[in-house]
Amino acid sequence: MAYLDEHMETISREELEELQYKLLRSQVTRLYSSSPFYHARMREAKVHPDDIRSLQDIVKLPFVHKKDLRDNYPEGMLSVPRREVIRYHASSGTTGKPTVVCYTRKDIDTWTESLARGLTSIGLGPDDVIQVSNTYGLFSGGLGFHYAAERIGAAVVPASTGNTERQIELILDLGVTAMAATPSYMLHLGEVAEKMGVSIKKDTKLKVGLLGGEPWSIKMRDRIDEWLGIKGINCYGSSEMYGPMFTECSEQDGIHIWGDIAYAEILDQETGGPVAPGEKGELVLTMLQKEALPMIRYRVGDVTEMVDEPCACGRTHPKIRRIFGRVDDMLIIRGINVFPSQVEHALMGIPEVGEHFQIVVDRKGALDTMLVRVELKKEAFTDNIVQLMDLRERIAYRLRGILNIKAAVELVEPDNLQRFEGKAKRVIDRRDI
Ligand code: ZN
């Protein structure tokens, strides 16, 4: 079993927690004296670095929200002298101003190390050719995977997004073995390849998909594996953390959060207190080594749960389950919480259903309505009305079973729903709330 940093990745839990406490203490001490933003926040919360006497004391520190980054746009949260910044990235906020994130040289190193450990943990190394089909530029995805792939000695193909035919040619011609992309792009690529007469499974060396950037289900993973012959590795991160930085290991059962780099808490969204072990809640991360834009108790907004049992891969760092969805993606329909990933999970269990769907939420009078538009597989599409009605009935029944609410179902011919090269936009909410 190959490790990038065997000592650190297999450190005992006691040693790890001791290290986390030391890093937390020195981070908080530094910020109190040199970051106007954190100094003000800690004064407000009446907490001093001396109050942090154990790792558990982290709960005394105030939360940081995405809104803080927006309110302090562009550099109000910068916590090092400006001349130490060597790079900027930005995230395209869907609402309002974008947020800008900045990095010192050490930040780029820590980020690279974090993702490179992940790539090593799934068995990638110098023999691999990794095509990075995430956007390069202000978005942190492309360069994040690029640096990590180089760090493990793999050959990088910096394809970025778009021009899917060309991407498929590169996969064939350069013997690409792994590809970083969103799960929806991976599916799109599979479809385009089929139209070109290329079977990703039989004609290429592509075996690993480094997939993330949007929540996706295990059923979707199994489909990608079955159809394209690609092991879909769940990758996690966001530009506020550094960028994409954590992945599943070869066990594919949870994402390792490197404890020397980040401390993870799972909190009850409403109360802000901890959930019981193994319960679902909002992920809150504290970056223990981040310099330019340190995030302390950052409310990531993703809903997941902690897996705190030893991993068969030998790594001792805690893991989180795949993300159920964003706190803000959660739809409340007739008082019931619905995540688009649950709809995906329900649909992917039905063999006739293709990979693309759309959820339309509306309000008729006082009542919320939910319509799920489902694209059928080519081979499942028929003009036999009775068969189609029966299928529609089965889909509606399964959705009701998983979501606990009734949804209308519309069957859509193959290739009729919109395709996405980046994050899929699966929900249309027409309610005027
Ligand atoms: Zn593991």
Image: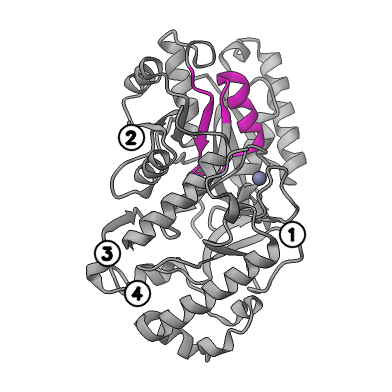
Is residue 197 inside the magenta stretch?
A: no
Q: Which residue is mark 1?
A: 279
Identify the mark nearer the N-term, 3 or 4.
4
Most extreme residue toward the top is 197
Q: Is 221 displayed left or right of 241 in the figure?
A: right
Residue 334 visible (yes or no) = no
Looking at the picture, the colour scheme in use is one colour
Identify the mark nearer the N-term, 4 or 1.
4
**Residue 284 appears in which quarter of the rendering?**
bottom right
Real-space CA distance between mark 3 and mark 4, rounded to the nearest whole angstrom? 10 Å
Q: Residue at x 71, y 45 (%)?
A: 403
Query: Mark 2 Cα within 10 Å, few/some/many (few <14, many 20+)?
Result: some
* Callout 4: SS: loop
Q: Nearer the viewer, residue 403 or 285?
A: 285
Identify the mark nearer the N-term, 1 or 2.
2
- Residue 206: percent from left, percent from top: 49, 22
Q: Which residue is mark 3?
A: 85
Q: Nearer the viewer, residue 24 or 404?
A: 24
- At label 3, which amino acid type do we have? Val
* Callout 2: SS: loop
Identify the mark nearer the N-term, 1 or 3.
3
Query: Is ligand 1 closer than 8 angstroms to the Cβ of mark 2?
Result: no
Q: Which mark is residue 160?
A: 2
Query: Mark 3 Cα within 10 Å, few/some/many (few <14, many 20+)?
Result: some
The stretch of residues the image draws in magenta is 205-231
Q: Are marks 4 and 1 in contact (CB under 8 Å)?
A: no
- Residue 373: percent from left, percent from top: 56, 32
